[in-house]
Amino acid sequence: MVLIPAAQATILEDTWEVSGLVGTGSHDFTVAQVFVPDAYTWCFGPDMPRGPHYQGPLYRFPLVGLFRLPVSAVALGIAQGALEACLALAPAKRTLIGTGVLRDQPFFQARIAEAVALVRAARAWLHTAVQQAWTSTLTSGTVSVAERADLVLAAVHATRSAAEAMQLVYTVAGGTANYRRSALQRALRDVHAVTQHIGTAPQQYEEAGRLVLGLEPLQPIVLW
């Protein structure tokens, strides 16, 4: 890995043309004819030199967690925001099928409850997996393979559950959700963009399954 001042990179403004997470502005960049001193380079791997500042627990926490957890947290945040937007809509929006407002419809009541359960359950497991790994880091300085498998599984599960909950919310909100002025259509695109991240892609279920079964991981980074 190399570090350079941001001013020495050129951001390509027109490359982030995507359906979701448009607001992140994650454009490509180029670096040309830049000299990087040795002091600004480091080996990204388990055998990299570790100075005194690496002795703190944060630096001993599994890299697999630090790489995946932020992604799943974004997905859960998107779904939670969509739930709140839909609940705010429910008391006011009148329905064309049935009588009363959206909140009074049994179908809406059941689906919104399912979405709430998906988000809350996924968040609870994610927090539990992180807390267990952090506790092990503090007490023994290491995190077991089983605990690493839990980190991977909880992160992937949270992301997929958030997307499933988001789909429920978008559907029960009806045609209102399809307008560009609605936060729900943007949230639907954003959460599905998150599911495409390699850190929480469906293939990670295979990686977690290998760890659960006592097999060597396909990605050595899982054990770093």
Image: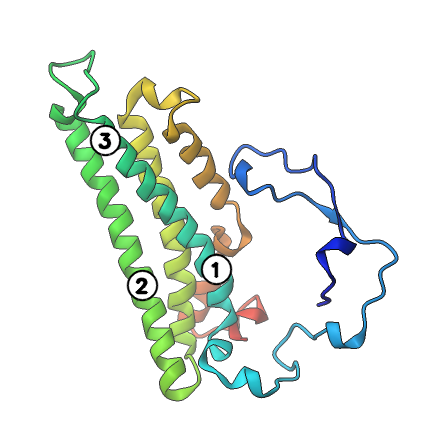
Lower position in the chain sequence, tag 1 or tag 2: 1
- Residue 146: image location, x then y, percent: 38, 74
Residue 213 visible (yes or no):
no
Mark 2 neighbour density, 10 Å: few (under 14) some (14–19) many (20 or more): some
Task: Give me the C-alpha separation between circle 1 and circle 2.
Answer: 13 Å
Res. 162 image quadrant: top left
Mark 1 neighbour density, 10 Å: few (under 14) some (14–19) many (20 or more): many
Lower position in the chain sequence, tag 1 or tag 3: 1
On the picture, is 22 further left or further right than 76? Answer: right
Q: Residue at x 15, y 32 (%)?
A: 109
On the picture, is 59 further left or further right than 118? Answer: right
The C terminus sits in image quarter? bottom right
Residue with the mark numbered 3? 88
Residue 53: numbered disc? none
> Along the line of sight, which residue is nearer the eye, 87 or 126?
87
The residue lying furthest to the front in this view is 7
Lower position in the chain sequence, tag 3 or tag 2: 3
- Under tag 1, what secondary structure? helix
Q: Which amino acid does label 1 sit on?
A: Arg
Q: Which amino acid does label 3 sit on?
A: Ala
Which marked residue is nearer to the observer: mark 1 or mark 3?
3
Mark 3 neighbour density, 10 Å: few (under 14) some (14–19) many (20 or more): few
On the picture, is 201 further left or further right than 161? Answer: right
Task: Give me the C-alpha separation between circle 3 and circle 2.
Answer: 27 Å
Q: What residue type is labelled 2?
A: His
Q: Which residue is drawn at 85% across and 65% down?
A: 35
- Residue 140: image location, x then y, percent: 39, 88
So how many labels did they put on this image?
3
Residue with the mark numbered 1? 68
